[in-house]
Image (spheres, helix red, strand yellow):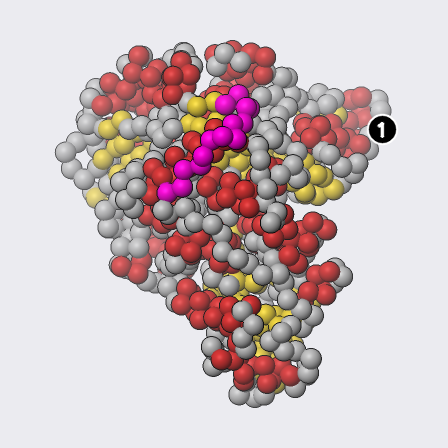
Amino acid sequence: MIKLHEGGAYLVNGVTLADEAAVKAQTGKDVNAAEAKKATMAYGILQAHNTSDNMEHLKIKFDKLTSHDITFVGIIQTARASGLKKFPIPYVLTNCHNSLCAVGGTINEDDHMFGLTCAKKYGGIYVPPHQAVIHQFAREMLAGGGRMILGSDSHTRYGALGTMAMGEGGPELVKQLLNQTYDIDMPGVVAVYMTGEPMKGVGPQDVALAIIGAVFKNGYVKNKVMEFVGPGVKNLSADFRIGVDVMTTETTCLSSIWQTDEKIAEFYEIHNRPEDYKEVKPGDVAYYDGVIEVDLSKIKPMIAMPFHPSNTYTIDELNANLDDILADCEKKALVSLDGAVDFKLRDKIRNGKLYVEQGVIAGCAGGGFENICAAADILNGASIGPDEFTLNVYPASMPVYMELIKNGAAAKIMQTGAIMKTAFCGPCFGAGDTPANNAFSIRHSTRNFPNREGSKLQSGQIASVALMDARSIAATAANKGYLTPATEVPDKIGAYKYYFDKSIYENRVFDSKGVADDSVEIKFGPNIKDWPTMGALPENLVLRVVSEIHDPVTTTDELIPSGETSSYRSNPLGLAEFTLSRKDPNYVGLAKDIQKAEKARMEGTCPCEVHPDVKPVMSVVKTQFADASHENTGFGSTIFAVKPGDGSAREQAASCQKVLGGWANIANEYATKRYRSNLINWGMLPFVIPEGELPFTNKDYLFFPGIRKAVEEKAAEIKGYTVDVNGNALKEFTVTLGSLTDEERQIILKGCLINYNRVD
């Protein structure tokens, strides 16, 4: 089904995998891996967008930007503070996350009006709520062969359409709005070599989950580009490829790109943009740093059990070993949930079968035309029943919804008792279709992390989500909630032709055509607040450890929960109150407590006057560092996590810590490049400490002498000290910062990206 190569490999004529000897035998020419790397699709697109003269150290300018309504307010506010006058490239503001305008009073709709007026003032595009989810609009209206798009959502992936797209935290979009660059070292490129053809009943989510299960835990594609090639690609429709591609984010890869062909050309023709199609393919001999072989014919319906997309099984395997697998999931949940609730899955076994309380087909992954048509065929003539099980279906855009109405698929679904809803990302991040306590939900969406479905562990509330393909969700629904793979009903699935109605957008979407109107006054709701003042990195730092997390991976959902907190995404101080609220409820109080010392210092007052720990800590520090004083030593907080930052690109996972006085994270490694970038852009030190016993524990104080000088002089190692007040001693340890560009160092030294760019 899935095979990972231990080393690299060559691809000849886009078809045949070969080693160096085989390439020479086929072509009669000597080959060089370094030169053959330049023949990958990724290299060609990156080269075309690189503004530096060095392909090892890239400075990328993107063609277009896109954001949704829990990120664009903060991005534009940051850019405005830095002197923004006009969007320099097309920037699309979609409204698909805070679409439910009843949560938090007027807050959400105020954010929408902010977005509309900014699109007018700065020359952007505004997509109103319920028209399209961010990524579907980008596929329909923005993608193009050979282009690059940057989005402030982690699932910004349009590789199937020949577009290299990346999801990053908001500050990286701010840089593009200020005509700065996206700076990365040349990434590795891994081939996803496809052969065969999927069996009937297998959908794109099944293929995606099989790949994720094979590569996530071993980091095979971490921060690399996944390049989809091979003879099997031609056997997949455009919608199928899109469905696989959007899930590449869950592998922790940097981006993705697919070879294009007549099926992708047809996609652009259907969407009235034939000129945007471009053939994208590898050169005659391309070299890849790794290869994932995927035999599509052997993929079976999959399920990703709670609480990660990589926790995968075939549905057949799960059904055959129900008690054992569910018991193992319960055991794993003890780590994810910290034992805060009595989590059970085995109570879902009824008459030897797994019973599910909820099904959802939604968003950028599940809400595509073919997914919903296949679900409609499977459900045709069935009933979902009057018991606990419910099914909700969210088409990814109004044009898709319109066609489902015209071709009868929507009616087939609704006749079963299922509900059709409008384009909305809520079920993916916990703002819609929250299950009942202890309920089990199956979803064709992107993630199933703890808390995303609305759980509040501190209140004793827990629900869980498993990821599946729309086809098997429909088969389960037709079986009234008993888990069923779609391969048991393959003959019910037909074929449909899609017709795109652009007039829906022409009648409702605001498009400035790139023309800015400076006379427009931005509308600010009472919840839209400016970023608080942030100081520059001081000479020395005293940090208090205010949270210690030993889970194997910590997600951004745990750092700043989604769901109801989304209404405060435009209010930095208001949102910060939710930081780590479901993972470590003591964090906010501890962080704010030590922040008092830094606020006093910034105001010219001795921190010892507002915090009782300052004097004894500094007394110990002065035993070895006599020059340290409150004039040159800053105070703040840090957290330790083994591997923080998996999941969403949301910058708030870092900015909320900064707003509460955070100066650093300490980790064994960072789960994603985007979370580490968020830390840097908010002026936080991304410390790395070797695995093993920590030299500190929660609530300890740490002293970092000469930290500013260490950043300036690019120190390979940085010495820190655990302050033992009782023993009147300092215990030395070492951390590193990893690779930093000169610009990133300046951002940290200035205290954050806003300070780096500020125009007073």
Whether residue 36 sits left or right of residue 672 in the image: it is: right
Q: Residue at x 62, y 39 (%)?
A: 178
Question: Which quadrant of the view contains residue 274?
Answer: top right
Whether residue 394 sits left or right of residue 551 in the image: it is: left
- From the image, tell me which residue sits under label 1: 30
Q: Secondary structure at mark 1?
A: loop
627 above or below 386?
A: below
648 above or below 479?
A: below
**For the view shown, which residue lies furthest in the left direction?**
386
What is the chief secondary structure element of the magenta stretch?
loop
Q: Residue at x 63, y 63 (%)?
A: 537
Give residue 633's position: percent from left, percent from top: 62, 72
**For the view shown, which residue lies furthest in the bottom direction?**
727
Magenta extent:
512-525
Question: Which quadrant of the view contains residue 205?
Answer: top left
Q: Residues within 10 Å of mark 1 (few under 14, many from 20)?
A: few
Give residue 747's position: percent from left, percent from top: 64, 53
Indicate whether residue 238 is drawn in magenta.
no
Give residue 608's position: percent from left, percent from top: 52, 80
Residue 175 shows in this picture: yes
Q: Foreground: 376 or 279?
A: 279
Give residue 27's position: percent from left, percent from top: 80, 21
**For the view shown, which residue lies furthest in the front direction?**
519
34 above or below 491?
A: below
Whether residue 649 sits left or right of residue 704 in the image: it is: left
Q: Foreground: 432 or 78?
A: 78
Q: Amino acid at mark 1?
A: Asp
Q: Foreground: 314 or 130?
A: 130
Residue 670 shows in this picture: no
Q: Residue at x 55, y 46 (%)?
A: 81
Indicate whether residue 519 is drawn in magenta.
yes
